[in-house]
Amino acid sequence: MIPTSEVQARAQERGILPPVEEVRDGVYAVPLAMPFTGLPYSFSYVIRAASGELHLIDTGLDTDENWARLTDAFRSIGSSASDVATLTLTHLHPDHAGLAGRLRRASDARVGMHIADQRAMHAGAHFVEPVSANTVIAGWDVPEGRMEEVRDAAIRPVAGSPVEVDRPLVDGDRISAGDRELRVLHTPGHTRDTS
């Protein structure tokens, strides 16, 4: 992971997750832990509209620690999970879509995802194919005694339980995030079975 700010660089030097950081006016990067993946964290981005509603890009792995970190981030900007109006998932991997179901239940947020990832989710795509799981996981520095747990998590369908998608997205679509507009760029190849 390459730090993109001084705050992130200092946290990386200390071996800790960086704090929530306002990277642009009203846009917050929330680092969420990625245990056993070889990477220290992924980001969820929170866009706070002038109206107070929140628009979230990605959710992080579905762990209680990440849920607490995400809801703490909301509180730190004077909001809560119930203020999330939209949730856009960049792709289906569990470090980006894992908390989607939990967040939707807490907020009734409208969910957007590329139609290829939506199809893969409903087809039960796996993060790691079961036949190659042991070989792939061997390079992840999994602690002694946790290999079976990590293997079980890695071969589950990538999104865990499918989340209801309100808006299937395609390349070029425009997404309203309060007073901002985002454009969908389809970049296939990172998520299995989504070309």
Image: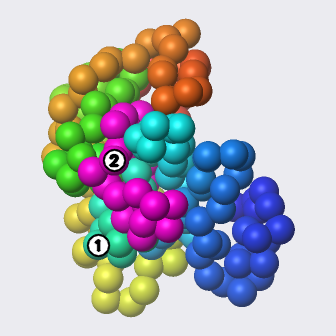
Locate residue 93, reporting x and y percent.
Answer: 40, 45
> Are the residues flagged by discs 2 and 1 in contact, CB closer than 8 Å?
no
Residue range in magenta is 70-97
Q: Which of 125 and 169 is in front in this view?
A: 169
Q: Find numbered disc 1 in the image and state the secondary structure of the residue it sits on.
A: helix
Q: Nearer the viewer, residue 34 or 145?
A: 34
What residue is rendered at 40% in x and 17% in y? 169
Q: Nearer the viewer, residue 178 or 150?
A: 178
What residue is rendered at 66% in x and 56% in y? 22
Q: Find numbered disc 2 in the image and state the secondary structure of the residue it sits on.
A: helix
Count residues near mark 2 (Cα–Cα under 10 Å), then give few for <14, some for 14-19, many for 20+.
some
**N-term-proximal mark, 2 vs 1:** 1
Answer with the quarter of the image where residue 122 lies: top left
Locate residue 40, reporting x and y percent.
Answer: 58, 70
Locate residue 30, reporting x and y percent.
Answer: 54, 60
What residue is rendered at 60% in x and 55% in y? 29
Left or right: where 181 falls relative to 52: right
Q: In which quarter of the image is the N terminus?
A: bottom right
Q: What residue type is labelled 2?
A: Asp
Count residues near mark 1 (Cα–Cα under 10 Å), then give few for <14, some for 14-19, many for 20+.
few
The residue indicated by pointer 1 is: 64
What residue is rendered at 42% in x and 86% in y? 143
Q: Which amino acid does label 1 sit on?
A: Asp
Residue 70 in view here: no
Residue 7 in view here: yes
Q: Nearer the viewer, residue 104 or 51?
A: 51
Answer with the quarter of the image where residue 110 lies: top left
What label sits on residue 35 in the rendered view? none
